[in-house]
Image (cartoon, grey):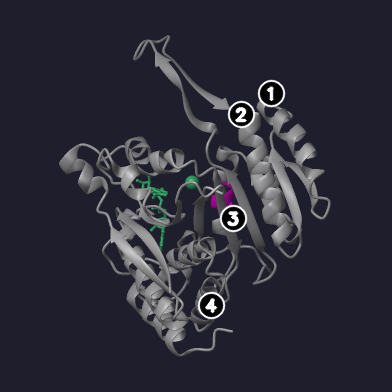
């Protein structure tokens, strides 16, 4: 029997609702598969924890998480805590402390879910965005001086290192190689950002030589937004900087129908540390506690986690179940249905228990 230790951090807002749903589905999958067991440790690190303790996680938080094989994360952010405090208090220390330098964001139009793009259905939009997750525009380098004065100044320095760019480029080419179309688009803004992003272009060219079976092209980030909307079929795998890919992946999630279905993984490809898997969406204050949060993003997230753990068969079965449940019209309001989180979860568990998942 294969054992995996999962650290669950549901955190804030709808996080606890969708992570509970995801854990229920994972348990059903493990029971169905029979070959693996998930041992789940639950952590209450969140904005509520911060109000009580003044920190988002204990001092030895990373040492505790390091014992896990993977981290299953909900969302962090509360209305009475500034977002940069919560983000830098919990998610970013994990991403950076565990060198999760590859952020992966698969996007597809699921059956039953309507894309805002006319004539785009399942199959027309099937992307994997690879986001550099350790440096670039979100390095936390910069400062402020002359606070409050008319001559106040703030800098936000984007850091690009050869090591950082090369490793994400290799990961992106290797990811593209595993996909059916084997095509990578390298996104930059190397016309205007003439140092760091010209380095990206140069390194892309160098790394491409090691992947002769992957075709690739380049796109500037502004043009890329148009291409994603106008010619979604021309896009397969995408690699971009921390900031650019952050924005492109929200666009991707919207074009696929809803933030409520979009998953992501913060991966340490070297496997020195546990990787962290989470829905892309945030705390969703407007629907917290209403029981209507879409759990599909956390299901898809769970599938990415299983794949990373080496349980490819269960990961694929989970996505077949998601597609069956969506195709049957069992959808939450954000994707045009009237089912509750619990109803979608129950349908998933039934599909996993009884269904033919290939
Ligand atoms: P959000 O993702 O929380 O919500 C945006 C909109 O999408 C809302 O209308 C919400 O109801 C809807 N939505 C999101 N997920 C949904 C789901 N599963 N089902 C149905 N509808 C869903 O983004 P926001 O409003 O910009 O941010 C709210 C808080 O969450 C902020 O504090 C922000 O910092 C935080 N946040 C955290 C993360 C994270 O932890 N990774 C990501 C984004 C935002
Ligand atoms: Mn974002």
- The outermost residue toward the front is 1
Determine contact: label 3, label 2, CB under 8 Å: no
Q: Quadrant of residue 198?
A: top right
Point 59% across, 55% down: residue: 252
Q: Earlier in the sequence, mark 3 or mark 1?
A: 1
| The magenta segment | 247-251
> Label 1 belongs to which residue?
195
Please state which of the two labelled residues, at mark 4 or mark 3, is closer to the viewer. Answer: 4
Picture coordinates of residue 13 (x, y %)? 30, 55
Please state which of the two labelled residues, at mark 1 or mark 4, is closer to the viewer. Answer: 4
> Label 4 belongs to which residue?
317
Picture coordinates of residue 181 (x, y %)? 76, 62
Queried on whether the Cβ of the residue with tag 1 lies below 8 angstroms from ligand 2, the answer reads: no
* 20 in relation to 275, above or below: below
- The label on residue 160 is 2
* 176 in relation to 63, above or below: below
Point 34% across, 43% down: residue: 62
Please state which of the two labelled residues, at mark 3 or mark 1, is closer to the viewer. Answer: 1
Quarter containing the N terminus: bottom left
Picture coordinates of residue 234 (x, y %)? 76, 57
């Amino acid at each position: 029997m294969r054992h995996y230790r999962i650290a669950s951090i549901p955190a804030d807002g709808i996080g606890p609702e969708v992570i509970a749903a995801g854990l229920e589905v994972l348990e059903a999958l493990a029971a169905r598969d029979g070959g693996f067991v998930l041992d789940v440790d639950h952590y209450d690190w969140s904005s509520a924890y911060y109000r009580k303790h003044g920190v988002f996680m204990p001092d030895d938080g990373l040492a505790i998480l390091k014992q896990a094989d993977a981290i299953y994360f909900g969302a962090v952010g509360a209305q009475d805590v500034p977002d940069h405090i919560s983000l830098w208090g919990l998610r970013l220390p994990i991403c950076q402390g565990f060198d999760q330098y590859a952020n992966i964001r698969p996007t597809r139009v699921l059956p039953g879910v309507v894309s805002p793009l006319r004539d785009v259905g399942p199959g027309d939009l099937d992307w994997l965005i690879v986001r550099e997750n350790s440096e670039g525009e979100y390095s936390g380098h910069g400062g402020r001086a002359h606070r409050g004065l008319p001559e106040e100044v703030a800098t936000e320095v984007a850091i690009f290192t050869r090591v950082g760019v090369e490793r994400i480029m290799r990961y992106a080419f290797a990811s593209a190689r595993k996909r059916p179309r084997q095509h990578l688009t390298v996104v930059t803004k190397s016309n205007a950002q003439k140092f760091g992003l010209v380095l990206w272009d140069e390194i892309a060219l160098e790394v491409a030589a090691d992947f002769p079976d992957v075709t690739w092209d380049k796109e500037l980030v502004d043009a890329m937004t148009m291409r994603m909307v106008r010619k979604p079929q021309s896009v397969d795998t995408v690699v971009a900087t921390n900031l650019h890919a952050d924005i492109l992946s929200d666009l991707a999630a919207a074009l696929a129908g809803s933030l409520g279905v979009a998953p992501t993984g913060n991966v340490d490809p070297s496997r020195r540390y546990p990787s962290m898997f989470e829905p892309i969406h945030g705390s969703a204050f407007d629907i917290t506690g209403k029981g209507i949060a879409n759990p599909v993003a956390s299901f898809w997230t769970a599938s990415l986690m299983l794949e990373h753990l080496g349980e490819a068969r269960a990961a694929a079965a989970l996505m077949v179940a998601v597609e069956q449940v969506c195709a049957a019209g069992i959808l939450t309001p954000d994707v045009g249905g009237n089912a509750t989180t619990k109803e979608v979860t129950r349908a998933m568990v039934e599909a996993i228990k009884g269904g033919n998942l290939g």
